[in-house]
Image: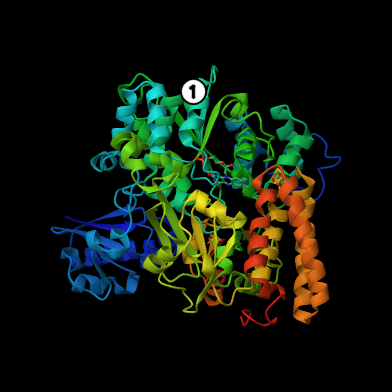
């Protein structure tokens, strides 16, 4: 179930006084959206877009700014699959596991991807290059199986094509 | 200068459309030929993507699927004047897979530059909004009601009736919310429209705003669609520039604007009340109804929540009249349905047809069998909460009531095709697993039942593979009990309809569960 995958709340985290590497990003996200009605998701998206994840220590900062409890903010961060509480690899590959992709071999492709990267789903390769996430439909179901690499969709992906994609990511600069 | 059209749609891009566009531009440069490359949406004929079209004196001519390596040979074959080539698909106007459709909502998709208001108007856009600007709100609502339009998001509720409730609810603010969460596997019509003709959606939302007295719209877009996000933002900017959004929409004196908000990877946020919670910045937990969103929706205000396709059908209804739209269809399912053929199908894509077309007609006339070349064994219609149909049910017409009559649902019009290697017990297990992953957690039958269901299916599959009939029967009884509990004790269709794929698989394919037929039958994959 949701909320149980990302560990517990940021227990005992103190209000952050010291600046952190992510503080500017959090400030910018708050400045842009704190007065937006229902602005918490845009704030979290903005933080993750710059920092790469939502640092647990940023939760109290966000909660303070929005006049919410930490539990509220933590609850939102942990509810949505998109938000990470720790950094991902330099690239993120999302492999579709949904029915249309399964009908043309998605399960085998997922197994291949895990073997190839030496990870389970949600894991990051040991060299930190790639995080492998499952996704449930990319809207490319007529060209299945589909994977999304850093936001770009690839269709009719074979294991060999997957390997080529990985090689491209590892060969290039992150 | 010759205009060449290459889709910028994410599906077309997923099989190399960008590289093809680039190759055409480079080759043209080397040959000193002037071409203007227009990135359109996709026609939805995905087996032909990348599908390149050229504007010739005799109309548009198509070539596909084109690889970058083939581009020089296209120039050699004089494709810029419609010359013959191995990849020729002939004049677009006579392509059978398009001629056999009834493109109403998708008439402009694949044709126009998605973010050009001028192109949009030249192809009939804005007539509906102009008309709406001359009508009283009640008259707009009445037109939509008489068209027979029912919500395309799955529940098939009459759109006009919903709007009437919002119109009649007194409030200082009202909202139009477009449900662009499109989470169902096998569906991509919303994405195709948003990437290919977003101005139709924008126009539809503005008309909805006029109809109910709302000045602010939101498009709740799933984060899995970054391309659609980019196109929508560009289209919204173009719409504001052209005065079709803002303080004085097309000189009508009425105000309307739209903001895009991104989801964050939660299937349940497609459910309208969870969506509203999410828009309010909260966890996407389903709300109990009543109150209906039409009375107390976003931030407690009366809110229209409609699917992309429902809203996109509205401009045409206003422009051409309710009767024209209602003239298509069968029974109480009026108009057209953009059907999406997906999965193991030779010709996957979007085919807009009148309601009443049968599954078999779609598979035969458009789908052309499986991609693997093996026999079709099952289709799942209506996404992860939809039933699995065996071949004996393929003559069912796509019609909301006809599907309900066979314990299935049309939903968002997605049809996923499986060949004879499919293991329906595994698919039933997946349905339970998906529910466990995506449950909002509010009701026990859904939250816990789906976890138990996954475990039961694991034991059932083990027993099946061991040929232990007694153990299979024990697990089947447990599975049916669980499904009963989920059907009766769930607040929304996530828990309430997960039993549909599970029980339909069990009913129509018992041999996959180790019942009736020998264990090995149908599972040779
Ligand atoms: C679990 C679940 C997921 C849903 N997902 C979507 C979706 O992705 N898109 C959608 O338009 N409707 C979805 N719906 C239906 C909406 O709750 C709602 O009926 C619809 O947005 C209303 O718009 P319409 O009347 O235009 O169909 C979903 C419903 C449930 C129960
Ligand atoms: S049925 Fe499931 S998804 Fe729907 S409200 Fe209950 S727990 Fe949430
Ligand atoms: S099911 Fe994989 S892209 Fe839709």
Q: Nearer the viewer, residue B289 or A135?
A: B289
| Chain of the residue under the numbered disc 1 shown in the image | B
Q: Quick check: B285 left or right of A99?
A: right
Label 1 neighbourhood size at 10 Å, few (<14), some (14-19), many (20+)? many
**Where residue A164 sits: x, y (%)?**
52, 73
| Location of residue B79 with respect to B249 vertically, above or below | below
Secondary structure state at the residue bearing disc 1: helix
| Location of residue B514 with respect to B275 vertically, above or below | below
Q: Quick check: B392 left or right of B326?
A: right
At 67% from the left and 46% from the top, the residue drawn is A80
Q: Is residue B270 visible?
A: yes
At 64% from the left and 81% from the top, the residue drawn is B521
Q: Quadrant of residue A15?
A: top right
Q: Quick check: B31 left or right of B503?
A: left
At 56% from the left and 29% from the top, the residue drawn is B294
State the residue lying farthest toward the right: A12
**Where residue B459 sits: x, y (%)?**
80, 70
Circle 1 is placed at which residue position?
B167
């Amino acid at each position: 179930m949701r909320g149980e995958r990302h560990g517990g709340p940021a227990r005992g985290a103190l209000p952050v006084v010291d600046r952190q590497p992510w503080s500017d990003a959090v400030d910018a996200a708050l400045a842009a959206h704190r007065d937006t009605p229902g602005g918490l998701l845009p704030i979290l998206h903005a933080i993750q877009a710059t920092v790469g994840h939502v640092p647990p220590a940023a939760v109290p900062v966000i909660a303070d700014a929005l006049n919410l409890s930490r539990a509220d903010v933590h609850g939102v961060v942990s509810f949505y699959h998109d938000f990470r509480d720790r950094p991902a690899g330099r690239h993120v590959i999302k492999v579709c596991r949904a029915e249309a992709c399964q009908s043309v071999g998605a399960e085998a492709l997922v197994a291949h991807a895990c073997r190839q990267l030496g990870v389970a789903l949600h894991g990051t390769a040991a060299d930190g290059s790639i995080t492998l996430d499952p996704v449930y439909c990319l809207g490319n179901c007529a060209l299945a199986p589909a994977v999304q690499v850093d936001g770009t969709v690839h269709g009719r992906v074979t294991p060999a094509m997957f390997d080529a994609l990985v090689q491209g990511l590892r060969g290039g600069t992150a | 200068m010759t205009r060449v059209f290459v889709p910028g749609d994410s599906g077309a891009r997923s099989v190399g459309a960008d590289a093809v566009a680039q190759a055409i531009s480079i080759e043209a440069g080397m040959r000193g030929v002037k071409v203007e490359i227009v990135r359109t949406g996709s026609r939805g004929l995905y087996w032909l993507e990348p599908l390149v079209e050229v504007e010739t004196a005799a109309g548009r001519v198509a070539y596909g699927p084109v690889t970058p390596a083939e581009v020089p040979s296209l120039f050699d074959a004089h494709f810029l004047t419609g010359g013959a080539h191995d990849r020729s698909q002939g004049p677009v106007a006579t392509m059978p897979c398009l001629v056999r459709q009834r493109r109403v909502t998708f008439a402009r998709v694949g044709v126009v530059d998605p973010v050009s208001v001028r192109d949009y108007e030249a192809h009939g856009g804005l007539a509906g909004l102009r008309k709406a600007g001359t009508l009283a709100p009640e008259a707009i609502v009445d037109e939509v009601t008489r068209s027979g339009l029912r919500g395309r998001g799955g529940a098939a509720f009459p759109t006009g009736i919903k709007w009437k409730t919002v119109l009649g609810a007194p409030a200082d603010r009202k909202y139009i919310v477009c449900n662009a969460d499109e989470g169902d596997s096998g569906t991509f019509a919303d994405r195709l429209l948003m990437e290919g003709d977003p101005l139709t959606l924008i126009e539809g939302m503005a008309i909805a705003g006029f109809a109910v007295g709302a000045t602010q719209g939101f498009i709740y877009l799933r984060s899995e669609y970054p391309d659609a996000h980019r196109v929508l933002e560009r289209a919204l900017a173009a719409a504001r520039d052209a005065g079709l959004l803002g303080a004085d929409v097309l000189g009508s004196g009425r105000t309307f604007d739209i903001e895009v908000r991104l989801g964050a990877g939660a299937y349940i946020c497609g459910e309208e009340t969870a969506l509203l919670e999410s828009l309010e910045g909260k966890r996407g937990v389903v709300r109990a109804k009543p109150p209906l969103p039409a009375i107390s929706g976003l931030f407690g205000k009366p809110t229209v929540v409609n699917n992309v396709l429902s809203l996109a059908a509205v401009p045409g209804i206003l422009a051409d009249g309710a009767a024209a739209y209602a003239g298509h269809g069968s029974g109480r399912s009026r108009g057209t349905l953009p059907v999406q053929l997906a999965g193991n199908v030779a010709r996957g894509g979007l085919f807009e047809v009148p309601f009443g077309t049968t599954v078999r007609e779609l598979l035969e006339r458009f789908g052309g069998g499986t991609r693997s070349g093996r026999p079709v064994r099952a289709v799942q219609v209506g996404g992860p909460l939809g039933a699995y149909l065996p071949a004996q049910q393929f003559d069912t017409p796509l019609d909301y009531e006809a599907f309900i009559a066979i314990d299935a649902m049309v939903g968002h019009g997605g049809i996923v095709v499986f060949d004879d290697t499919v293991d329906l017990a595994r698919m039933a297990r997946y349905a339970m697993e998906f529910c466990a992953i995506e449950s909002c957690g509010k009701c026990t039958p859904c939250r816990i039942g789906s976890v138990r269901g996954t475990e039961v299916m694991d034991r059932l599959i083990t027993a099946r593979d061991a040929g232990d009939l007694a153990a299979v029967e024990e697990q089947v009884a447990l599975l049916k009990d669980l499904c009963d509990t989920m059907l009766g004790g769930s607040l929304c269709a996530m828990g309430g309809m997960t039993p549909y794929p599970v029980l339909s698989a069990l009913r129509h394919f018992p041999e996959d569960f180790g019942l009736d037929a020998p264990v090995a039958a149908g599972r040779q994959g």
